Amino acid sequence: MSGLYLVGRRRSHGFSFIELLATLAIMAVLLLVAVPSARLVTQRHREAELRSALATIRDGIDHYRKAVEQGRIQAKLGQSGYPPDLAVLTEGVDDVSTPDRRKIYFLRRLPADPMYVGAAVDPAATWGLRSYASPPDAPAAGDDVFDVYSTSAGTGLNDVPYKDW
């Protein structure tokens, strides 16, 4: 009699096809929500890096200019007083106000543009340069570095092109 009782009962091992489909549907919905969110977080992080890098370089340029105004860096007549290139900020310049002409350094390292898409080895090559003589609406490189900007063609989350930051 016990053999008849077991024959009527069926033991299930594993999941049914419907359960697997429901699980896959739930996972697909979760992925549809997670992927755009992850991209947004990544873009925000890169934009924060861009803001920080721009502030760091611009601060170094301003300190260089201030050192020229204070007479600590010898500038030639007719020059703007801004650094001739970005490398000067990390390589240092002679402080003419000290007897031993110690070097003045304005940056420990030059940050690269986080929005740059190429494979530049030199971080200075990732930035667009604006000289003191060029107008703000048409920045162009020249004899000095008055400002830097991103060369990326992208637009930020604030709908402002990265080159205008």
Image (spheres, helix red, strand yellow):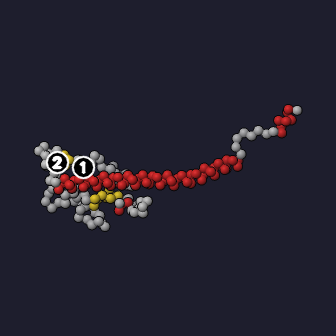
Q: Residues within 10 Å of mark 2 (few under 14, many from 20)?
A: some
For disc 2, the marked residue is 94
- Gap in angstroms between the C-alphas marked 1 and 2: 12 Å
x then y, percent, for residue 30: 58, 51
- Residue type highlighted by circle 1: Phe
Q: Say which element carries label 2.
A: strand
Q: Is residue 86 visible?
A: no
Q: Is residue 46 left or right of residue 85?
A: right
* Residue 143 against residue 15 in the figure, above or below: below
For disc 1, the marked residue is 106
- Mark drawn on residue 23: none
- The quadrant of the picture occupied by the N terminus is top right
Q: Quadrant of residue 150?
A: bottom left
Q: Earlier in the sequence, mark 1 or mark 2?
A: 2
x then y, percent, for residue 90: 25, 48
- The quadrant of the picture occupied by the C terminus is bottom left
Q: Quadrant of residue 132?
A: bottom left
- Residue type highlighted by circle 2: Asp
